[in-house]
Amino acid sequence: MPDTPRLATSFRDVEAWIFDLDNTLYPPETDLFSQIDVKIGAFLQRALNLDAVAARVVQKDYYRRYGTTLRGLMIEHGVAPEAFLDYVHDIDHTPVLPHPELAAALTALPGRRYIMTNGSRRHAEAVSARLGITGLFDDIFDIADAEHLPKPQAPAYDRFWRRHGIEPKRAAMFEDLPRNLLVPHEHGMRTVLVVPRAAAAALREEWEDEGRDAPHVDHVTDDIARFLDAVIRAIAPG
């Protein structure tokens, strides 16, 4: 955990706190995203008439090149985003457990709080309900709000900042993918990378962790609630 003076310097002027959803607000070891991953593969098999192996190759190629598999499907095949999102987020959310420590930390943060996700609002609301953090955010900015242009592409952030009147230099971004923190850092945001613990790290592809030690990552934690609690104590008056 970073020392208190460094946390105070980084976060004392933050007025807007922005959180990614999947594998950030809930821990990767929950393995919720594996359900989505399977459904994305099944959607590809049907939509593109592919076998499971070929669908997997396309899925991961689009995810890496376009930011989401959906974006690749829209650009290269004209797939309607609503049908995709409705299908892949129709999952069992019960593996996500209530997290009272996270709820308490979010409540104590000064200023505004947002979820910014490449997923759907419905999925974000379901996860929030399971975590026990419903109502703690000023808004959920989902992929439809971004006009289906995902992070890490710069226009997605621009649309988010404009909609909510956010000054990036007075904001902080929490993400599980280093590449999604590059644009925020370039605009002056404080950036926090939320990494998986050892048990869940093996579930990630190697490229997803590229940039973990790059200059655009200001802080790294494997426990977002504990990190937020440390920030709150560091910036508390007196």
Image: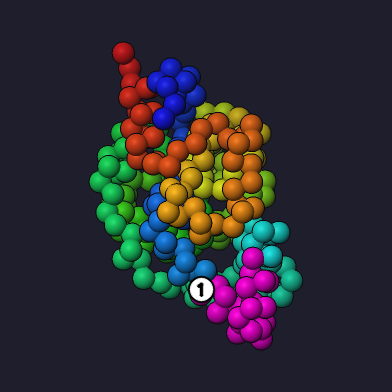
Give the quarter of the figure containing the C terminus: top left
Q: Position of residue 102 (x, y in %)?
A: 32, 43
Per the image, is 90 magenta? no
Q: Amino acid at mark 1?
A: Val
Instruction: Please tell me whether residue 114 is drawn above or below residue 167 in the rendered image.
Output: below
Q: Position of residue 9 (x, y in %)?
A: 48, 19
Outermost residue, right side = 76
Give the residue number, with chain letter if any, for mark 1.
Answer: 38
Please state which of residues 165 and 201 is positioned toward the viewer in this rendering: 201
Please state which of residues 161 and 212 is positioned toward the viewer in this rendering: 212
**Is 90 left, or right, of 71 in this rendering?**
left
Which residue occupies 64% across, 35% down?
214
Residue 150, quarter of the rendered image? bottom right
- Residue 106 appears anywhere in the view: no
The residue segment tinted magenta is 38-60
Residue 108, quarter of the rendered image? top left
**Is 213 left, or right, of 23 in this rendering?**
right
Which residue occupies 45% across, 49% down?
198
Which residue occupies 67% across, 71% down?
57
Residue 101, quarter of the rendered image? top left
Instruction: Please tell me whether residue 53 is drawn above or below residue 208 in the rendered image.
Output: below
Q: Position of residue 225 (x, y in %)?
A: 35, 40
